[in-house]
Image (cartoon, rainbow, N blue to C red):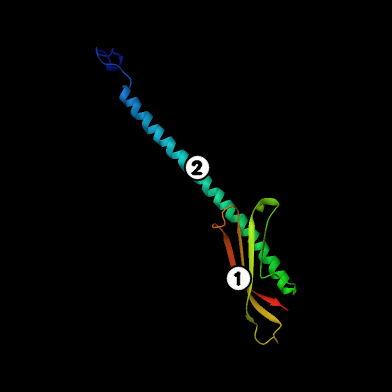
Amino acid sequence: MTDAASRPPESGTRAGFTLVEVLVALVVLSTGIVLVLRAYETSLSALRVSRQSLWAAVLVRNILSETQTALAAGEPVGSRDGGRSVAGPVEDFQWERLVEPVRRAPGDGGTNTLVQVEVSAWRGDPDSRYTITTYMVRTE
């Protein structure tokens, strides 16, 4: 009795893959690689946008903090000003600040004014701004 695994293959049959099977495997593998690369590219793009939004938020919060300090100290703050950051991770960000009086604070003799402060920051396209609007008290 001979073992089936030890017998030589019958004539006309060969072990291995056909050309069609190899080509199908290559197409499936190529499609998978392309999908992975596209997902990687999309994640890098999202990371860039996220990083830019983060630094815009940091810049806006710093400007709001400076504005609040100046208003509390009674220092003059322009109704509309802006600028460009020139150093650090917020380099090349542009920013704009609008300060508009809303009303005088009641009951304090007219020395304090409620103001609306809007600060925006962006890099490159001004249509993709990061904006915070808040209210503060201006001491006069």
- Looking at the rendered image, the quarter that the N terminus falls into is top left
Q: Residue at x 73, y 72 (%)?
A: 76
**Image position of 81 with respect to 35: above or below:** below
**Which image quarter: residue 128?**
bottom right
Tag of residue 84: none
Quarter of the rendering occupied by the C terminus:
bottom right
123 or 28, which is in the foreground? Answer: 123
Q: Which residue is mark 2?
A: 41
Q: Quadrant of residue 107?
A: bottom right
Q: Nearer the viewer, residue 48 or 97?
A: 97
Question: Label 2 is placed on what type of residue?
Answer: Glu
Kind of element beneath mark 1: strand
The answer to whether residue 96 is above or below residue 21 is below
Residue 69 at x, y percent in the picture:
72, 69
Q: Is residue 21 left or right of residue 89?
A: left
Q: In the image, what residue type sits under mark 1?
A: Thr
Disc 2 is placed on an element classified as: helix
> Is disc 1 surrounded by few (<14), some (14 to 19) or many (20+) residues within 10 Å?
few
- Near-viewer residue (20 or 86): 86
Name the residue at 46% across, 43% down: 39
Which x, y percent locates residue 16? 33, 20
Q: Position of residue 38 (x, y in %)?
A: 46, 41
Few, some or many C-alpha atoms within 10 Å of disc 2 (few <14, some 14-19, many ≥20)?
few
Residue beneath label 1, please?
134
N-terminal of the two: label 1 or label 2?
Answer: 2
Residue at (57, 59) in percent of width and height: 129
Q: Is residue 67 above or below residue 112?
A: above
Please give left or right for residue 39 compared with residue 2 in the image. right
Check contact, mark 1 vs mark 2: CB within 8 A. Answer: no
